[in-house]
Image: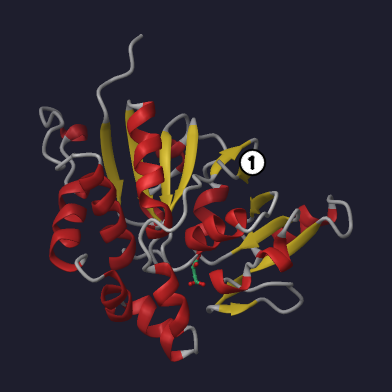
Amino acid sequence: MPEPALGLDVVASLPEAAEALLDGRNVVVIDVLRATTVIGQALAAGAARILPAATPAEARELAAGLEPGSFLLGGERGGYRIPGFDLGNSPLEYTPERVKGKSIVLASTNGSVLLARCRRSRRTLALSFNNLSAVAARVRDAGGSWVAVCSGKLGRACLEDLVCAGRLGARLGLAGEEGPADSLDDARDGLTIARLLDERLGGDLAEMLRRCAHGRYLESIGFGPDLERCAQLDILAGVPEMAGGAILPG
Ligand code: MLT
């Protein structure tokens, strides 16, 4: 069967992303603040792979099966490094000196939970502003039907992930209104909403990240410099992609 024409659905938050929606699908996972930004940075800095875990306990279990010295535990709760973990969830920590050649077992509150849920997806790519053009090119080359899933924040939609999804739609030349809407199931507004948010608020990405709720929280606990890093557009050429439960550089 030929691939359907390029299409992008946008799902606004984690609870909407039931496994039934992800299984067998082409998925782009977005967690601008900060999990998918961290993943792009860690792999660009030479990490061998990222193993996403839904909880810190699951991360420790995954790590127990790995060769000692071959991995680092990374992630956060409440934005802070998890006690006993090697790294937190700031992209600035994932330097070549720390991560080169290592597997990173990552447990974050929202992004890694969503990634762990994508183990049966057909393809899973990790998107942030840092690698937006590279991901858009990969999606355009593959064609077919894609769903961009925003990790959101504690079960709710968040501004920064929707703006990023909207920017992906813009790069793909998709407005959100071109799909069929002749069945109840096909009538979806996610991409239209995301495009409108990007048009309205995406002009200054650093300002948008300082303004959104999670950005204000991160700034309040001392991670202001992360916002500047997460706002940088197209500084990375890699497209992290899931294969066999691990996210590999691509
Ligand atoms: C998450 O996955 O929940 C986020 O990356 C949280 C954070 O900013 O550390």
Q: Does residue 210 sit above or below 172 in this rendering?
A: below
Name the spot of residue 45 as percent of width and height, x first.
Answer: 63, 59
Q: Where is residue 179 shown, x and y percent of the image?
A: 15, 31
Q: Amino acid at mark 1?
A: Gly
Residue 89 located left or right of residue 200: right
> In this view, which residue lies farthest toward the top?
1
Residue 75 placement (x, y as % from top left): 62, 68
Residue shown at 29% from the left, 48% from the top: 168
Residue for point 21% across, 34% down: 185
Q: Residue, x 70% and y 49% (percent of image)?
A: 48
- Image-based side of 127 in relation to 162, left or right: right
Q: Secondary structure at mark 1?
A: loop
Judging from the image, the colouring scheme is secondary structure
Quarter of the image where the N terminus is located: top left
State left or right for residue 186 relative to residue 19.
left
Is 223 rendered above or below residue 36? Answer: below
- Residue drawn at x 35%, y 60% is 233
List x then y, in percent, for residue 109: 53, 67
Q: Residues within 10 Å of mark 1 (few under 14, many from 20)?
A: some
Lateral position of residue 70 relative to residue 213, left or right: right
Residue beneath disc 1:
245
Closest to the observer: 228 or 153? 228
Between 200 and 228, the one lying in front of the other is: 228
Q: How many marks?
A: 1
